Amino acid sequence: MSTLPTSADIPTKTVLQAIGDRRTIRYYDPEKVVEDWKIKTMLQAGRLQSCQGNINATEAIVVNRRTTDMWDEIEECVSGFNVQMINQASHLIFWVTNLNAWYGRANDGLSTLAMSGALTKYHGWNYEFSMTQTIPRLMSFPTERTDQLLRFESGLAVANAMIAGEALGVSQSLIAFGRKPGGVEKAFGLPPEYKFTWAHVVGYPNEDRKAGGQRVRLKFEKLFHDDQFKNPMHIEPELVEWQKQAGMLQEQAPLDGRFEEIDRIATQFSRDPGVVSWPEREIKRLINDDDWDFGPRIKARAQQLIDQGGLPDYPEEMLDTFRRIMEERGLDVKKFLGEDA
Ligand SMILES: Cc1cc2nc3c(=O)[nH]c(=O)nc-3n(C[C@H](O)[C@H](O)[C@H](O)COP(=O)(O)O)c2cc1C
């Protein structure tokens, strides 16, 4: 039996701190293996996440790089920029969504809720109506609809697992498997009703846990609306301060030494050093874009890149892509084209 945690292993980290501490970690220590109990605790967190009608549509296949005999098949499917990650992380979790749970388990799931005292007449549940209307209607949803509903739910389960992992000191990243469409389903022999939703690497980091700082997002008021769409919800500076104290909001990337750290790890594994940079004109435009919550560190980095010079221009393929987006989606992305518009 694998080692079990002791009471001393129960994390004291608050949820808000775990949310703030979480980073997508992209450098893993290939020698370190995540303890089974931590992975099982993450899965348990996924299992306990809210799920519609208690139908339990989200499942996961946990693959240990050291013991699986499917590694080559798996590696063929992962997007190129994730290859290093899967080969250095400890485990891969493939989250899958069982669409048939909607049709085959909703009836039982709702019954469990009634027996648990969660689904009540107070809220209008009534046996006759449920059996003649609600449940038959739910069970007649087309697959496209249940696909959308249940994938959302799987996302929630993964998010819960990630925060539990963070609380236990496990590092992680969600990773795309876009190289070989259908490859993961084939490798595991998934029946057609089982949809591969997302893959998730877990391990211990080979980079600082802060991974260079919290990654910038759009401004709060650009994302959240108060009472009405497009009526920005403002956040009080005092509340932002409180969220900082709670560990939720942390110093923004790039922290001092981040680029040296990246180069150090690259040297350790004989990989190319450095990061990719965008055209100068684009960096200038973006850093002045008021939608983004750019703090002083990222602004200084932008300036440093501009001062260093030698930045590329967009190649024709990229310019064509922007033009196509405008045509096909009716989106005004002329800003990306600058004077080439
Ligand atoms: C559904 C999903 C898929 C993602 N896929 C990848 C991926 O394939 N490779 C990768 O390096 N990061 C991936 N990420 C991580 C995001 O790029 C990351 O969340 C973003 O860089 C913000 O950084 P943070 O997570 O550290 O806040 C994914 C994130 C999500 C939510």
Image (spheres, rainbow, N blue to C red):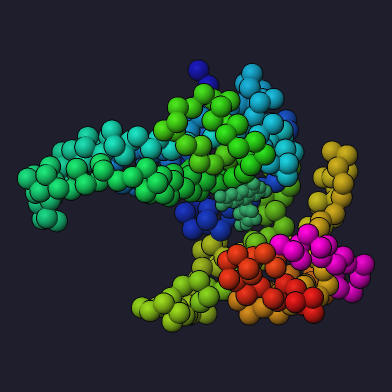
Image quadrant in which you'd find residue 311: bottom right
Q: Is residue 308 magenta?
A: yes
Expressed as whole percent of the image width and height from the top left, the position of residue 189 reads: 52, 23
Q: Is residue 300 visible?
A: no
* Observer-nearest of 189 and 57: 189
Expressed as whole percent of the image width and height from the top left, the position of residue 118 reads: 19, 47
Q: Most extreme residue toward the front, as rendered?
A: 327
Q: Residue at x 63, y 68 (%)?
A: 327
Q: Most extreme residue toward the left, as rendered?
A: 128
Q: Residue at x 74, y 64 (%)?
A: 320
Magenta highlight: main SS: helix
Residues in magenta?
A: 304-321
Q: Residue at x 41, y 49 (%)?
A: 148
Seen in the picture, residue 19 relative to 71 is either above or below; the reply is below
**266 horizontally vs 210: left or right:** right
Q: Is residue 90 magenta?
A: no
* Observer-nearest of 326 and 167: 326
Image quadrant in which you'd find residue 293: bottom right
Q: Residue at x 21, y 37 (%)?
A: 107
